[in-house]
Amino acid sequence: MEDCLFCKIIKGEIPSNKVYEDEEILAFNDINPAAPIHILVIPKKHIASLADMKKDDEIIVGKIYGVINKIAKEQGFKENGYRVIVNCGKDAGQEVMHLHFHLLAGEKFGDKIV
């Protein structure tokens, strides 16, 4: 997608503070964090949202959760816990129409919804 912000980040057209990258997945720090640790984890394949996933996309979503767990361990917040949020569509607060997972940590959330 030519006008997709995250596709531009994947291509290197827009800089990001990368936390993790492989052939299929990119993770980078959110520029407008909602928590002390706020990392966005995205598939490199453009998928607009969870609602737009195809059967074959289920594999990459499973891999993303594995990457999230790896990041949590490497960054030292796995034991204390973290929150993963996926917004699906504009009414749910999805601002960039490229599937992305918000990985939040660094504070006790309790009932707080970020």
Image: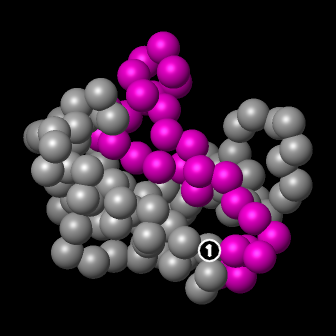
Picture quadrant of residue 5: top left
- Is residue 16 among the parts visible in the rendering? no
- Residue at 27 percent of width and 78 percent of height: 22
- Residue at 45 percent of width and 62 percent of height: 65
Element assignment for label 1: helix
Question: Residue 9: percent from the left, percent from the top?
Answer: 29, 57
Magenta span includes 5: no
Please name the predominant secondary structure of the magenta segment in the image.
loop
Position of 100 with respect to 2 (left or right) is right
Identify the image quadrant of the N terminus. top left
Question: Residue 46: percent from the left, percent from the top?
Answer: 18, 46
- Residue at 34 percent of width and 66 percent of height: 63
> Who is closer to the viewer here, 4 or 114?
114
Question: Residue 81: percent from the left, percent from the top?
Answer: 75, 65
Picture quadrant of residue 72: bottom right
Identify the image quadrant of the C terminus. top right
Residue 5 sits above or below residue 62 on the image: above
Magenta span includes 80: yes
- Residue at 33 percent of width and 35 percent of height: 50
Q: At label 1, which amino acid type do we have?
A: Ala
Position of 33 with respect to 62 (left or right) is right
- Is residue 98 among the parts visible in the rendering? yes
Q: How many numbered marks are there?
A: 1
Task: Identify residue for label 1.
Answer: 72
Question: Residue 89: percent from the left, percent from the top?
Answer: 39, 22
- The span shown in magenta is 75-103
Position of 88 with respect to 2 (left or right) is right
